[in-house]
Amino acid sequence: MAERMTYGGHARAVLGLGLPLIGGHLAQLAIGMTDTVMMGWYGVPELAALTLAGSLFFTLFLFGSGFAWAIMPMVATFAARGETVQVRRATRMALWLSILYFVVMMPLLWWSGPLLELLGQTPELSALAQTYLRIAGFGMLPALGVMVMKNYLAGLEHTRVVLWVTVAAAVGNVAMNYALVFGNWGAPELGIAGAAIASVFVQLVSMALIVAYALRVLPEHALFQRFWRPDWEMFGQVFRLGWPIGLTTLAEVALFAGASVLMGMLGTVPLAAHGIVIQVATATFMIQMGLSNAATVRAGNALGRGDARHMLDGARVVMVMGAVGVAVSIALFVLAPELVIGLFVDPDDPQRAAIIAVGRQLMLIAALFQLADAVQVLHLGLLRGLHDTRVPMIVAAFAYWGVGMPAAAGLMWLGWGGVGVWLGLTFGLTVAAVALGVRFWRHGAAMVVSPR
């Protein structure tokens, strides 16, 4: 029997995996924020179109990323068993699924203008958004490929390269936007089309970098040797594990989109305050997301070895580390809400005081929200490591849309305003956290001992 790892050993292993992943998530977040800021400097119509187009692109991309997320636990499990061929098979079929998904989705992006008009957008705004999506849509293929390769490498505990490739992409995105959006450094001024070209270029370069790393450092996997040969058995395995992850992610994204719609019904000030608090909460949530990814790899590794004790000890360490991250976030939200919100509002804006007042209330609710969100995403990560995705998908969808959204809408209409919307979201996430926690702590060890 293998020697039992100490809790300190687990903590070092989780940090070694998790810190680069946290940094990578923050760098990815910075890419989106950079696009928004630069397009805001360029023009208001272009900013509105980018926001609209980006929401559609991001929603479709997240759903398709479920196949990429699926291989992180699969690769971790196969690697623990020494099954190199299985690692190659799973990664290849995740790339196949990503290519097929891109082929299906590209027509939707190409003819997105009429679709956006059907959804109530103006012809001018829809045309601008379509201009962006017809170019940026081609970037979905390398973007999905990058996601597959990142999760493949993370499953093998090569997380530092994931960080550096994402940081390089963030820096490159700033430079390309500066040149192509505004016409600097001798480049043509292309506006929103320039932002789309920059996005495609950055994704292509990221894909080239991460593939080059994999081929150099892990040549034994021979990922692209006879790549064209189908492997329908593994194709089915990746598909069955991946589509519930995609739907779970989509349900959560849609929940927050729905919350934004509710806040918009309350007026410009509440919506502005909501947008600021969501951005801050998303940034702090990246800590939990990185830890969740590390938990997926560690649990998948334990599954491969059939070591339930190792998995449960590691899970305890991850939960404690998540609690520390939550404590830091809560301290920020409770002790310095005005300072944080003030960073996002022009000092001369006549509505600054009103936005800060509403935002301060939302930040207090966000402190509770952070705890529930952390617990649910950490348990999602642990369960994914055990290749358990369908039941968590059902649990999450019910919690988000059967509890969270009805509670948010109900409390808002009862006169609780923005605070009610955020309390409703917190209720939904709490239900998810409790249900997912119960599933993991009651059944997790059995999944390792008797994997399905």
Image: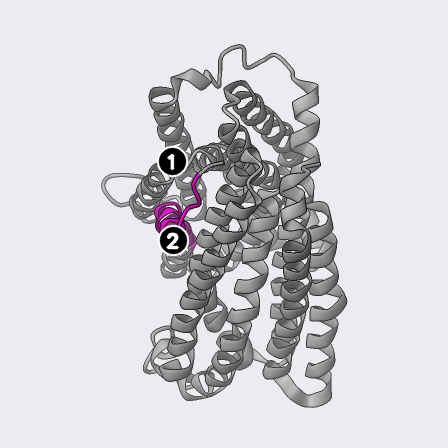
Residue at 45 percent of width and 63 percent of height? 320
Q: Could you tell me what secondary structure mostly forms the magenta stretch?
A: helix
Q: Within the magenta stretch, is there residue 25?
A: yes
Residues drawn in magenta: 3-32
Find out whether residue 323 is within the magenta segment: no
Q: Which residue is mark 1?
A: 158
In this view, 168 is above or below 208: below
Residue 20, relative to residue 87: is it above or below? below
Q: Residue at x 38, y 30 (%)?
A: 210
Whether residue 444 can be seen here: yes
In the rendered view, tell whether residue 435 sits above or below residue 333.
Answer: above
Q: Residue at the location (68% across, 82% down)?
A: 412
Q: Is residue 286 left or right of residue 62?
A: left
User: What's the residue type where badge 1 is placed?
Assistant: His
Q: Residue 448's spot in the image, x, y percent?
A: 62, 41
Q: Which residue is mark 2?
A: 11
- Asked whether the viewer can see residue 61, the reply is no
Mark 1: secondary structure: loop
